[in-house]
Image (cartoon, rainbow, N blue to C red):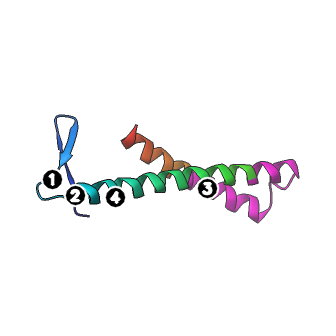
């Protein structure tokens, strides 16, 4: 990945020759990715709750969703570690 920013004393600046508009567009795509991961995590958690309510915790679907929830939780956690 070609960086568009450089870190200087806990702040960020545009790297030499970087286009501000392109940097903002890239930031927007990162924010979209984060929002999509949060939304998918929420939907997965809802599906898990539905299956729990139906007492279907031993099903393949439940176990797959549980794995998905763990993966998404890890992704969201890593993003939040760096952006918050």
Q: Quadrant of the N terminus?
A: bottom left
Q: Quadrant of residue 25?
A: bottom left
Question: What residue sits right under mark 3 in the picture?
Answer: 40
Residue at the location (23% across, 54% down)?
Answer: 20
Residue at the location (50% across, 48% down)?
Answer: 76
* Cα gap from disc 2 to disc 4, whole angstroms: 10 Å
Q: Quadrant of the C terminus?
A: top left
Task: Tell me which numbered mark, 1 or 3, is placed earlier along the sequence.
Answer: 1
Q: Position of residue 43 (x, y in %)?
A: 68, 53
Q: Residues within 10 Å of mark 4 (few under 14, many from 20)?
A: few
* Cα gap from disc 1 to disc 4, whole angstroms: 14 Å
Q: Main secondary structure of the magenta part?
A: helix
Question: What residue sits right under mark 1 in the picture?
Answer: 15
Question: What residue sits right under mark 2 in the picture?
Answer: 3
Residue at the location (19% across, 45% down)?
Answer: 13
Q: Is residue 72 left or right of residue 32?
A: right
Q: Position of residue 41 (x, y in %)?
A: 61, 51
Which residue is situated farthest in the left direction here? 16
Check whether the beta carbons of the residues at disc 1 and disc 2 lie within 8 A of each other: yes
């Amino acid at each position: 990945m070609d960086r568009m920013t450089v870190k200087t004393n806990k702040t960020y600046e545009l790297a030499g020759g970087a286009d501000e508009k392109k940097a903002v567009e890239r930031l927007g795509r990162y924010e979209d990715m984060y929002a999509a991961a949060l939304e998918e995590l929420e939907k997965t958690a809802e599906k898990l709750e539905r299956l729990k309510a139906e007492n279907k915790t031993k099903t393949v679907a439940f176990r797959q969703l549980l794995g998905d929830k763990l993966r998404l939780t890890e992704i969201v956690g890593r993003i939040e570690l760096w952006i918050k």
